Image (cartoon, rainbow, N blue to C red):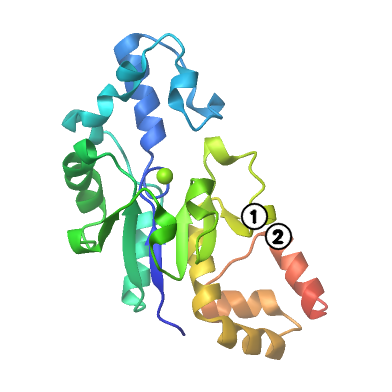
């Protein structure tokens, strides 16, 4: 297994910023914008009755960051990756005014095994070196010299990830599978060939990887197995 340097975005990759933000704006301004209906990167377009200042105001409030919750299994998978010997760096393009509260009320609270030394603040994420980057923003992955893992989010649902050389994931279980695939590529190839009659069973038994049904069908067909 290769030891990887894994770059991980924060907002809407390891936590649900947008969900908390929409709830907060609805509560303050009496609007009724549905989180699920948002399709734009720019939240201002979803709140046409509010000014840009009103939309962004919650992000500098400590109380707001206390309402931002982690994504399911993000903490478990990141801790697992560290225990496997991988390096984790949080790479976030956060505005400087938000950093302290965001770190204290979200990152260090829900991901206490990640220290400030492993946080990189960067707008041009393509400048950062690593083996994998997990991010919900396609513009942070495009052109980067790393394996590109796109976390599904409302604003990127219509984006063609595979056309841009990215792997789309829907949850942190999928991220874990991506990490295993990159770190253990050689061992996986050998193991899959040796178990080509039942690769799905092999992946589950030896790697703890459970595939989606369509992935199982695809894999068996590629390897020429019968199950
Ligand atoms: Mg993000």
Nearer to us in this view, 140 or 6: 140
Question: Is residue 118 shown above or below 83?
Answer: above
Residue in the picture at 58% in, 74% down: 204
Residue in the picture at 26% in, 56% down: 111
Looking at the image, do the residues carrying marks 1 and 2 touch, with CB atoms under 8 Å apart? no
Question: In which quadrant is the C terminus drawn?
Answer: bottom right
Residue in the picture at 51% in, 47% down: 139
Q: Position of residue 29 (x, y in %)?
A: 33, 10
* Inter-mark Cα distance, 1 to 2: 24 Å
Left or right of 14 on screen, residue 151: right
| Tag of residue 225 | none
Q: Position of residue 140 (x, y in %)?
A: 47, 51
Q: Position of residue 22 (x, y in %)?
A: 39, 24
Nearer to us in this view, 62 or 148: 148
Residue position marked by numbered label 2 in the rendering: 213
Q: Position of residue 128 (x, y in %)?
A: 38, 62
User: Which quarter of the rendered image does ligand 1 occupy?
Assistant: top left
What count of labels does the image hold? 2
Residue in the picture at 65% in, 77% down: 201
Question: Is residue 195 shown above or below 27?
Answer: below
| Tag of residue 164 | 1
Q: Nearer the viewer, mark 1 or mark 2?
A: 1
Q: Does residue 40 show up?
A: yes
Nearer to us in this view, 156 or 15: 156
Which element carries disc 2, helix, strand or loop? helix
Q: Does residue 73 show up?
A: no
**Label 1 crowding class (10 Å Cα cut-off): few <14, some 14-19, many 20+?**
few
Which element carries disc 1, helix, strand or loop? helix
Left or right of 39 on screen, residue 92: left
Q: Which is more N-terminal, label 2 or label 1?
A: 1
Quadrant in the picture for residue 200: bottom right
**Label 2 crowding class (10 Å Cα cut-off): few <14, some 14-19, many 20+?**
few
């Amino acid at each position: 297994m290769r030891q990887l340097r894994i770059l991980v975005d924060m907002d809407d990759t390891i936590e649900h910023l947008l969900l908390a933000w929409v709830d907060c704006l609805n509560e303050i301004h009496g609007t009724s914008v549905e989180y699920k209906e948002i399709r734009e990167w720019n939240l201002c377009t979803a709140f046409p009755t509010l000014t840009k200042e009103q939309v962004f105001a919650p992000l500098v409030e400590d109380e707001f960051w206390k309402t931002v919750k982690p994504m399911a299994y993000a903490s478990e998978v990141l801790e697992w990756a560290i225990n496997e010997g991988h390096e984790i760096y949080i790479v976030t393009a956060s505005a400087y005014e938000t950093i302290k509260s965001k770190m204290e009320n979200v990152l260090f609270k829900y991901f206490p095994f990640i220290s400030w030394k492993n946080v990189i603040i960067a707008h041009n994420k393509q400048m950062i070196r690593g083996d994998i980057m997990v991010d919900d923003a396609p513009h942070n992955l495009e052109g980067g010299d790393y394996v590109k893992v796109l976390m599904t989010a409302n604003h990127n649902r219509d984006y063609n990830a595979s056309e841009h050389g990215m792997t789309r994931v829907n949850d942190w279980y999928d991220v874990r599978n991506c990490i295993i695939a990159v770190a253990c590529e050689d061992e996986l190839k050998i193991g899959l060939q040796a178990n080509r009659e039942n690769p799905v069973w092999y992946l589950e038994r030896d790697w703890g990887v459970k595939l989606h049904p369509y992935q199982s069908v695809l894999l068996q067909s590629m390897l020429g197995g019968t199950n």
